[in-house]
């Protein structure tokens, strides 16, 4: 079917149901970063494959809403005769509805695919435009999607105690006690990483994150009703679940929710499907809106998870060092006919990582931007965009992997040939911001929002900045992006707590020229060696272990303290890897981690 | 009447009215920092004179709620047999009501003294405790307050164009156009500084801020109904009001609001009295909640106001320099029988300021804390607390004044005799934070919340912090504290904009030993000399012109950039004052501003 044919089929279906419009978000019912092919409704309808966006289809017009990252991509991928492309915040859905929705129009949505908070907003916007927002019983797009892929059924396996660090039973008892304290009888959980963490299981239903897609009810006695396709539990090594966890087919969930009438049920208004809220209300349950109770304990890694993170970063750092040593050799041969392009480099790095027997997956599609491509913050190399590296350029490489003991995410910026003085200056400003975060001490109760500007200050002083956050939370063999903590300009009320892992990744991007980013993962710890104990202070311990390219550092721009941090870090990197490398790699590492 | 007698009288009055309780906040109907004696209800009832707090009186029990600044003071001033003293956030009213309020109890409040946002919260708390919140028609405390002072009637005068910089008519037309754009027909304005700014008038109804207390309605055609006691307009030089401003006696306001039925009326839920919201609702007006439209334009000083601020700070800085020179001389004579105590120093500084013919008032009660008193952040010296200064101590002096061309607020920390190495180290850490703010450049759109940690970082690195904001907004011959911008740990969504004046005042307080604070006022400007023009960048220009005591600076702890800032600042201070001083003062200033 052509894009026009798909749109016509959907419109016919809407007409049959008596609706004047329908909303097609990119999200699935779990609101995760990745969705399985069976839930790529927005891509099927419009061709748009970005990680966020929404289409709105009316009888005679349609639009697609994307954010600033995707304004170019949407024009490449989507037939804009069929869908007007709009910027999701500058030209929002609310305004578009006011322009095009007729009075009394019935705009439908699939309540599985939107959260209660999103629906409240959609309802406000629809009603402000004179229309009515209508929950669909089943998704009209699915009804016309003929070749829709089957939902994923990847086998689920244990996430063993040697990596998880805490028995699922103990986690459930803790959370159950917390629910009881608040008078909550059941928590509805729809975030797959929350369920994976709670039950100490991993799966493979989406790309780059070892998640089984499922739903769960956690009760205040620590028991769990787990709604998951039975096929996923019939693999070669299914998880050992204790008898407080009952498994059910997903189809039975509606009936189970109906049984919760009269009970107090917690539901996360930012994560749960509106469907669950509606069903529980209808059943006479009292819905309490609040954060998914797994979020904070999952974010606060336990001692075993932290030890695992160190081990994973040590091995990942070794792979990266071997790649970097190889890269420098290859880059030095550029004049002698050596050919380096982005795709080859992505592949080569991946090969080094795959040599680790514990390697499970990349944690995201590698970002490998040479020259001007490095300045495109969310760049992903394709056959079309692939660039050959040339001397005098920078090469930005953001990559990571999934290991059972930890998830990694690291960015290094590398010179190809001789970097310019301006590149060195900009790199050093980014490095100063990176060190400000890495070396920061801060009182308990401090949020990442409070720390964000420390990373930007050296750039700001020169008139520069970067249009992304300074740090995101990272899971333990889970999502490479997880909340609730982050380091960002945007207000965030979650204090950083010991055991939380966040990235530290300031950058600088000169459009059409080069991109710079220096990213390590750091773990929040109790601050050591504080001269005074007036206040309970926290600090970061850097997990990532790979050299920061000294050829891009202008030592004169560093303070003595910054230089001391860099030298101490490089000493750690050297000591971590030197024994594990071959002779040529050792020589390279000695040079790459020399004191400056 | 004794405190017990007053409480009994109030309880008898409540009984007559059929109420079970009554709330007595410190605020008056204008929600300002200062209230006139006629509105000191909390002080009359309880004896407590702090700047924030609330009493709750029930039939058989009563409590007073104060914040952390006042937990000691409340015990000194209030009979705790009559009023249980509680910490307003740790032991909140909500909890107390749950403990003591009986089911169905009627808790009354005076809707003139609470904002709509406060009332919504009070209602939630009262209802959660099983009671009912009841709006009083008139204040029962006023009914039993026999010797209540008359409301202030200070004469109102023009704030002339040479200081205001913009005609009231033009300000009103601008705001009216803004209201019209939003479909708002009238704005209800109750903040006295907003009205003073809008009408280019000043008065004298409260301490330290030249405000007339009044109310106003600004209509979308630029006309104003001004509700103000006619006596205030019959002084020697009453303000010249154009005929778009109609004056009315305050008693007629209720009737005027009744006439607004069917109109869309803007009202600030954080500033307006709940009374106005109730009255407008009753009249059938559509209340739109939003910020007082004067707040932002008042905060963004115009070119004349900024020039005035520079002039006022130059004169104020001269007075402070003369005091500092005198102080150093006197402190040097301490061993020879010279007597310095906090009260004498407050008085002496005030004398120097009063020599300026443009001096109008102090902008707040001077904070003069010697030794351990300096560590009490909101310390105000009294006859009882007054301390004699001794060698080896620090002296913290936070003061400011009102001039028609500007409002000042400056803190200097001074050594008495030889400071210890620890004092110098702590002072230098505070100075590093001060300089980080003073020298900061930041992109347009940045809020003060984003900058706050820059001032704390050097202290954090040593395990220190301070429990107050880094900066507050400052008015132009108006409140020394004004919003909406501020530099604070607390989230604040107001971007800093050119012309906004804020304080820059990091500190460090060692309980029982000493206090350190370095405070200058700074004005937001467009950043100059940015090497690249990629981004629109802002910066601060320091307004305050007085030496930062070099005897407390440990130069080895400063970076080259920090030292350059300090030397350049001291050069500005020297050049600003040197020609205006006598010979001895000149010699002192040369030394106090020597390069370090």
Image (spheres, coloured by chain):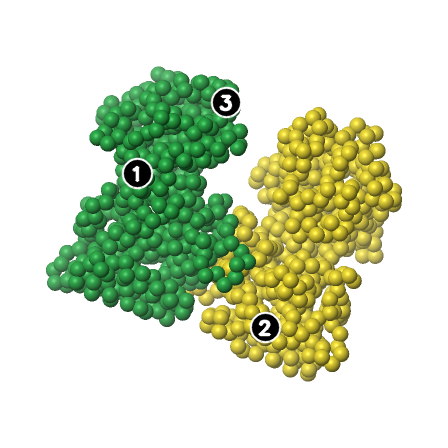
Chain colours: A yellow, B green
Tell which subunit mark 3 falls on: B
Image-based side of A229 in relation to A193, left or right: right
Q: Nearer the viewer, mark 3 or mark 1?
A: 1
Decide if residue B306 is in sight here. yes
Label 1 or label 2, whichever lies nearer to me, is 1
Q: Secondary structure at mark 2?
A: loop
Task: Read off the residue under disc 2.
Answer: A420
Q: Which residue is mark 3?
A: B263
Q: Residue at x 72, y 77 (%)?
A: A334
Secondary structure beneath label 1: loop
Q: Is residue A382 above or below residue B386?
A: below
Q: Assess disc 1: are there few (<14), some (14-19) or many (≥20) residues with their C-alpha within 10 Å of its C-alpha.
A: some
* Residue visible at 67% across and 57% down in the picture: A378
Left-right relation of B207 to A375: left
Q: Observer-nearest residue: B45 or B130?
A: B45
**x, y percent for residue A223:** 69, 43
**Going 42% across and 57% down the picture, which residue do you hit?**
B437
Residue indicated by mark 1? B160
Which residue is found at the position 34% from the left and 29% from the top?
Answer: B242
Tell me the distance, in whole angstroms, between the alpha carbons under discs 3 and 2: 64 Å
């Amino acid at each position: 079917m052509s894009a026009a044919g798909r749109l016509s089929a959907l419109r016919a279906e809407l007409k049959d149901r008596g609706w004047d419009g329908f909303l097609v978000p990119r999200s699935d019912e779990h609101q995760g970063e990745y969705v399985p092919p069976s839930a790529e409704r927005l891509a099927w309808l419009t061709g748009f494959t970005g990680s966020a966006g929404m289409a709105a289809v009316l009888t005679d017009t349609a639009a697609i809403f994307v954010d600033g990252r995707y304004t170019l991509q949407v024009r490449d991928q989507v037939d804009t005769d069929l869908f007007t492309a709009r910027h999701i915040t500058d030209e929002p859905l609310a305004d578009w509805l006011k322009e095009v929705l007729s009075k009394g129009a019935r705009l439908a949505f699939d309540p599985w695919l939107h959260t209660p908070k999103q629906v409240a907003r959609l309802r406000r916007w629809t009603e402000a435009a004179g229309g009515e927002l209508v929950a669909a019983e089943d998704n009209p797009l699915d009804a016309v999607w003929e070749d829709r892929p089957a939902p994923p059924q990847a086998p689920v396996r244990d996430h063993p105690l040697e990596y998880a660090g805490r028995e699922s039973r103990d986690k459930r008892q803790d959370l159950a006690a917390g629910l009881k304290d608040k008078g909550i009888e059941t928590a509805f959980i729809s975030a797959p990483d929350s369920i994976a963490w709670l039950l100490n299981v991993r799966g493979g239903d989406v790309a780059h994150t070892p998640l089984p897609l499922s739903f769960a009810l956690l009760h205040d006695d620590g028991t769990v009703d787990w709604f998951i396709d039975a096929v996923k539990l019939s693999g070669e090594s299914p998880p050992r679940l204790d008898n407080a966890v009952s498994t059910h087919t997903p189809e039975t969930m509606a009936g189970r929710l109906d049984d919760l009438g009269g009970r107090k049920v917690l539901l996360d208004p930012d994560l749960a499907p509106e469907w669950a809220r509606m069903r529980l209300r209808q059943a006479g349950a009292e819905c309490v809106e609040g954060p998914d109770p797994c979020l904070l304990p999952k974010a606060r890694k336990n001692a075993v998870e932290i030890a695992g993170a160190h081990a994973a970063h040590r091995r990942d750092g070794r792979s990266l060092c071997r790649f970097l040593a190889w890269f420098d050799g290859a880059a030095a041969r550029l004049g002698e006919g050596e050919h380096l392009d982005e795709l080859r480099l992505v592949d080569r790095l991946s090969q080094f990582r795959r040599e680790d027997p514990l390697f499970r997956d990349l944690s995201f599609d590698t970002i490998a931007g040479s020259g001007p491509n490095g300045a495109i913050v969310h760049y992903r190399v394709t056959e079309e965009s692939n660039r050959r590296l040339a001397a005098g350029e920078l090469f930005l490489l953001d990559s990571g992997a999934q290991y059972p003991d930890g998830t990694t995410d690291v960015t290094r910026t590398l010179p190809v040939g001789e970097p310019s003085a301006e590149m060195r200056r900009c790199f050093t400003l980014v490095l100063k911001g990176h060190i400000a975060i890495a070396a920061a001490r801060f009182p308990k109760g401090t949020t990442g929002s409070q720390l964000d500007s420390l990373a930007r200050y050296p750039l700001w002083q020169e008139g520069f900045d970067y249009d992304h956050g300074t740090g995101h939370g990272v899971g333990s063999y889970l999502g490479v992006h997880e909340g609730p903590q982050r380091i960002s300009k945007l207000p965030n009320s979650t204090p950083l707590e010991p055991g939380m892992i966040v990235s530290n990744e300031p950058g600088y991007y000169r459009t059409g020229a080069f991109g710079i980013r220096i990213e390590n993962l750091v773990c929040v710890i109790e601050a050591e060696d504080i001269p005074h104990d007036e206040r309970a202070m926290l600090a970061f311990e850097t997990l990532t272990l790979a050299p920061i390219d000294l050829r891009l550092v202008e030592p004169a721009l560093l303070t003595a303290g910054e230089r001391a941090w860099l030298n101490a870090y490089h000493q750690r990197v050297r000591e971590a890897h030197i024994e594990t490398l071959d002779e040529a790699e050792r020589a390279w590492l000695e040079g790459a981690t020399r004191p400056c």
